[in-house]
Amino acid sequence: MNSTPLTWRETMAWSLLGVVLFLGLWSGLTTSGLVPRQFLPPPQEVASRFIQLLTSPFAGATLPQHLGSSFMRYAYGVLLAAAIGVPLGLLMGWFRLLDDIVTPIFDGLRFIAPIAWVPFAALWFGTGIGGPVMIIFAGAFPPCLINAYRGARFVEPRLIEAARMLGTGHTRMILEILLPAAVPSIVAGLRVSAGLGWQSLVGAELIVAAAGVGFMMVQAQGSVQTATVMTGMVAIGIVGMIIDVLLRQGEAWLRRRRGLEA
Amino acid sequence: MIGRRGWIGLGTVAALIALWFLLTTVTGIVSGARFPSPAEFWLSLRQIWGRGYAGGQLMSHALHSLKLVAMGFAVAIATGIPLGLWMGWNRKAEAAINPVFLVIRPIPPLAWIPLAILWLGLGDSAKILVIWFSAFVPSVINTFAGVRNIDRPMIEAARMLGTPRWRMVREVIAPAASPLIFTGLRLSLQASWTTLVAAELVGALVGVGFVLNMAQQDLYPGMILVGMVTVGLLGWATTALLGMVERRALSWNMAARD
């Protein structure tokens, strides 16, 4: 292994080389006519389409409007998953019977890809808000549940013993012992949930929605507007990245506040 | 022996089936237009198993999807693991490739589906392409992390003994990184199924996702349930298979751990 880590300057130089090669290959292939533009537009065309879509509508709305309606569904789905998954996970971590009942159901459902819920979601809740929200929920729910459960399950037994000796009831035990101890695990789960939820959102909108970025991309695909499809991809990537960065910041802030290492 | 946990699990499943029967068939609280009764599920299963639905029998749809996942997954492994090994081994490669990853990684694999359809149409190759995209990233990242987490003294020792480079990769680096590589493979496999089902729902002419799509358009709850159960079973079976391979490949490590 090349054991010595590169210096900062070397890293930057190689990174720059990588990006330049990537963009160069992309624009070289497209501007030379080796790959038809209609197939793969050059980067500058995607960039200008992106800027254009910020103000001019496509498929009934501008890009920010599409992103707005996507994000609203996303927020509903993820919040619902957290609101049900985290308490259920904590309860399962405390009450053994509930654990034994829910786990087999959960294990059975785990192997069904969230996206496979699309037909039932459309049948039960329609294709407006409800259907997509249910699919996002299906994607974001498992990490919320699993991490809250693990966090509650692996609380230091001494804490539980001590609390029990002081005669703590079930409610206070869960709220004041298990919940605080499980917070790091829960937050890590939420971050995974947020990522999976965003991914499910894209899938849901590609298939059933009537607005949103995914819908815009399908419409653009239908009319062979490759630059618009790629604009959608870029927008989805940027928003996904922002969500991830914000959650990382939140996690770091929480760790600092709890006096753990930054 | 079945323990307490097992009995409660069995009881739960039995209770669920009883509840399903009760809600749909006995009381009719849940109408057949929303969720199928056990009898409707059975009829749908028999229909697709024998006469076929959406252009084929259940087995041919399932095998087609399985084939696509296997191919996409195989291509992703064959490209992802070597790239991860290389990036782990060579800091310059890491520095050059990482930024490209940082740009591409935030784009969810499912977002590639429209582009793949534009490029390759509704056939098999578009699906293999998107499966490759989705399964590639977890295999690269975990292989890379696996190489970076190897104990330094082990590499130093091998180097001191004058191990040639390719033997180093084959006999030291790859085995030592294999637990994390398998973690990556499990994530890749899961991603492959999700992506395939999504791609088949968006546009396909055969496959489990296509069955789901047709059933949705026909407002046919029984067949939707058959499709979902099939997706679940396929995911479970392939995960179990990978687990068996993993146990065999990592037996040295498991023994050391116990």
Image: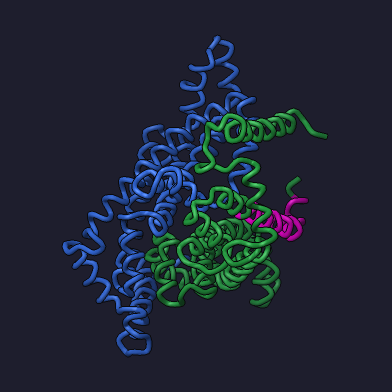
Q: List x then y, in percent, for residue B114.
A: 40, 68
Q: Is residue A59 visible?
A: yes
Asked whether B12 or A122 is in front, the reply is: A122
Q: List x then y, in percent, for residue B256.
A: 75, 51
Residue at the image point whose x is 69% and y is 33% from the top: B14
Q: Residue furthest left?
A: A55
Q: Chain A is drawn in which colour?
A: blue
Asked whether A88 or A166 is in front, the reply is: A88
Q: List x then y, in percent, for residue B242.
A: 68, 58
Is residue A128 depicted above or below B217 in this figure?
above
Q: In which quarter of the image is the N terminus of chain B?
A: top right
- Magenta highlight on residue B10: no
Give the residues drawn in magenta, as a range.
B231-256
Q: Write down the quadrant of residue A206 in the picture.
A: bottom left
- Magenta highlight on residue B244: yes
Residue at the image point whose x is 46% and y is 77% from the top: B120
Q: List x then y, in percent, for residue B34.
A: 50, 42
Q: Can residue B173 be seen in this view?
A: no
Q: In which quarter of the image is the C terminus of chain B?
A: top right
Residue at the image point whose x is 53% and y is 56% from the top: B212
**The chain in green:** B
